[in-house]
Amino acid sequence: MSTSTLDRVIERITHLADEAAAVVCAFLILATTFSVIVYQRGITIVWLDDVLRALLIWLVYLGSVSLCFNNDHITMDALFLRLPPRVRRILNLFIGLLGFVLCAYVSTVAVSSMMRDLEYGNLMPSGYLPVWPQSLAVPLCFALMALAYLSYLYSVVSGRNDRKAASSEFSEGP
């Protein structure tokens, strides 16, 4: 598989993570609306807070995958775009490498944590739902973020994705 094909596969995975985040967001909105209605009627559903928490965790981590792919959330454009192109390239290399290493590390540590949750049959705070579906978000999404950073790092090394064109008005400096 060539690197451009691999890059397109990673980009497609990133888009799938975005679409999954949109679905999770829709479920989160529906579940939140449902919980407000239920609680306003004086009905308590013990496990509902656990579901809302798990959906929020999935939403945050799935949404972070595309941010890593495009390096959209790391730099402060007001300062970054005023730096010389060579310094920006060095910073992008550092960010891509550090992002890849840290996300890969967190993913591997989170796998062992999730496996302990499975092994011990840990439950969410309500005591009704298993915690592993919530715990799965961390190793899975951080592995996807590591892949996204790897793709971003390749794009910086190959010189084909220095920064977005929409931000280029400040690239000349102040």
Image (tube, grey):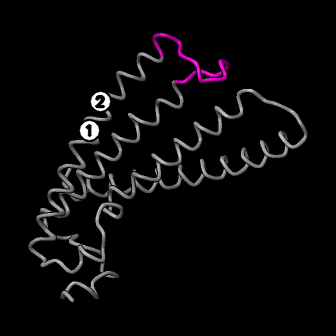
> Quick check: is 119 in the magenta stretch?
yes
In the picture provided, is 139 more to the left or to the right than 163?
right
How far from the left and from the top, in percent, is residue 64? Answer: 41, 52
Tell me if mark 1 has few (under 14), some (14-19) or many (20+) residues whose alpha carbon lies within 10 angstroms of its own: many
Circle on res. 162: none
Magenta residues, dominant SS class: loop
Asked whether 84 or 114 is in front, the reply is 84
Amino acid on which disc 2 is placed: Thr
**Disc 1 and disc 2: Cα gap in Å?**
6 Å
How far from the left and from the top, in percent, is residue 114? Answer: 42, 23
In the picture provided, is 86 more to the left or to the right than 35?
left
- Residue at left 19%, top 70%? 160
What segment carries the magenta color?
118-131
How far from the left and from the top, in percent, is residue 108? Answer: 29, 30
- Residue at left 13%, top 77%? 85
Tell me if mark 2 has few (under 14), some (14-19) or many (20+) residues whose alpha carbon lies within 10 angstroms of its own: some
**165 relative to 62, above or below:** below
In the picture provided, is 166 more to the left or to the right than 79?
right
**81 relative to 125, above or below:** below
CB atoms of marks 1 and 2 within 8 Å: yes
The quarter of the rendered structure image containing the C terminus is bottom left
Q: Secondary structure at mark 2?
A: helix
Circle on res. 108: 2
Circle on res. 104: 1
In the picture provided, is 173 more to the left or to the right than 22?
left
> Quick check: is 1 in the magenta stretch?
no
